[in-house]
Image: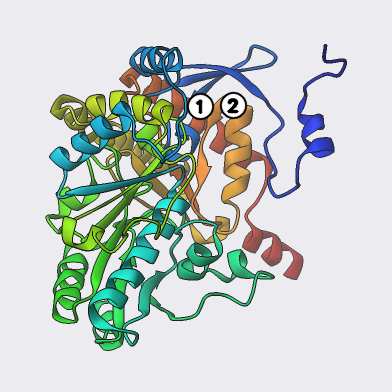
Amino acid sequence: MNHFSVTRALFDEVMVPNYAPAAVVPVRGEGSRLWDQEGRDYIDFAGGIAVTGLGHAHPKLVAALVEQAQKLWHVSNVLTNEPALKLARALCELTFAQRVFFANSGAEANEAALKLARKYAADHFGPDKREIIAFTPSFHGRTLFTVAVGGQPKYTQGFEPLPPGITHVPFNDLAALAETISDHTCAVILEPILGESGVVSATPEFLQEARKLCDRHRALLIFDEVQSGNGRTGSLYAYMGYGVTPDILTTAKGLGGGFPISAMLTTSPIANSLNVGSHGTTYGGNPLGCAVAGAALELLSDPGLLAGVRHKHETFMSGLHRINERLGVFRELRGKGLLLGCELIEPWQGRSRDFVKVALEQGLLVLVAGPDVIRLAPSLIIPDELIEEGLNRFERAIARLLSQTVPANEELAHAAR
C-alpha cells in the first residue's frame, strides 16, 4: 500500500521543522533497550525525556492497554468512565490531593493549574490578585501561557504579545521571592527540580520558606512535578521527599509510562473554582490513558521500587564519578533519584549536544538539560548490568569526543599563538 520507504529523510519531507531528530529511527523497545531499523541496539538512559519510567513495553502496561482497548476507547467528558475514576481515587489516596483534573500533557496540566489559580483568586479576593510568580530558569510547557510563565526568551521569541501579570525571580533565591511576593500575588509556581534547565534541585529552605510566604500572602503554591514526579526522585512525588506540600501539583511524563496523560491535583476548596464549564479538554481522562496510568501508578507507588530508585542513584553516581576521575569533563554531578545532571567543565560548556551525538554512535541514548548539562533519566527499574554497560558506552563516547576535538577555549588559545 505504501510505495515509499519510511526513513529519517522522510521527516524532512513531511514534518514541520521544529524538531531535529537524530539519524536513527527506533522501531522496537523492550525494558531499557531500543532497536533501530537496522536492528542495532541502544541502551536507553533518556527514557523518552523521563517518560518511560517502567521501560519500554512493560508487560503490565501492555496488558492494561490491550484489555481496555477491547472495551472502551473514548466517551468525552459528557460521560465519566471507570478507569478515570479509579485513577483519580488512587492519586487522592497516594497524595495530599482531594480532587483531580486529567489532561494529556504537562503543558496542559500546568495551563489548568495556572488558570485555576487565577480563577480561585478572582472568586475569593476580587480583581486585584492576579500576579503569578515564577522562577528563572524554568520550563513549564509550550502553550502561550506556560512559555510566558517559563520566562525563557528563546521559547517566547516571535510569539509576543505574551499574557501579562507574570513576574520572574531567580530560582532558589529566597530574598528575591520575599521581596517580590505581595497580596497581589495569586500563585507561585516552581519545579522542585529544574528538569530542562540543568537538573538543579530546590534547597529545602527555599521550598519551606516559599510555603510560608504563600500562606502569609494567601497565594497558592504550585509544584510542577511533570518531570520530578512518578517515582523519578525516589519518592512517589518530589514534594514528599522535601516534606513541603503544595496547594496544586501537576504531573505527566512518567504517569502514563509513554501513553499521553497528565493530571492536576489539588484540594476540594481550591478545586471548587473550576466549576462546570470553566475549563475542559476533549481527550483528558480518556479510558485508554487512565487504564495504562492506573497500572503504572500501582507499580510506581511500590516502596520496593522507590527504594530501588534510590539504590540505582548511588550506582549511577559512583559510575559517573569513576568516569570523571579518568576523563575529567564534569564540573558537577547532581540530581535526585534517577534524574541526574552532569555539568560540563568550562572549556566544554555550550557543547552538551556533542556528547549526546557521540553517545548515540556508541549505542547509548542520553539527553541535554541546556547547553552545559548532560541529563540522564533512565527507566526506574533499569537492571544494574545495563547501568554498567550503558556507563561503559558513555565512557567510550566521551573518550572518543575528547580524542576527536579540543574544547573551544583551547582552540582560541591556539589561534592566539
**In the shown orientation, is residue 308 left or right of residue 20?**
left
Q: Secondary structure at mark 1?
A: helix
- The residue that label 1 is drawn on is 393
Query: Which residue type does callout 2 highlight?
Result: Gln
Q: Is residue 252 above or below residue 400?
A: below
Please tell me whether residue 406 is drawn above or below residue 295 in the rendered image. below
How was this image coloured? rainbow
Classify mark 1: residues with Cα within 10 Å, few (<14), some (14-19) or many (20+). many
Note whether 309 is above or below 102 in the view shown.
above
Mark number, residue 362 = 2
The quadrant holding residue 235 is top left
> As drawn, is 357 to the left or to the right of 59?
right
Residue 80 in percent (x, y) is at: 34, 35
Q: Are marks 1 and 2 in contact (CB under 8 Å)?
A: yes
What's the residue at 24%, 24% (across, down)?
A: 299
Q: Position of residue 171 (x, y in %)?
A: 34, 70
Q: Element at badge 2?
A: loop
Please indicate whether residue 141 sits to the left or right of residue 341 in the image.
right
Q: Is residue 393 visible?
A: yes
In the image, 348 versus 411, the foreground residue is 348
Q: Residue at x 20, y 65 (%)?
A: 207
Q: Position of residue 270 (x, y in %)?
A: 22, 62
Q: Residue furthest right?
A: 3
Identity of the residue drawn at 46% across and 69% down: 149
Mark 1–mark 2 distance (CA, rounded to whole Å): 6 Å
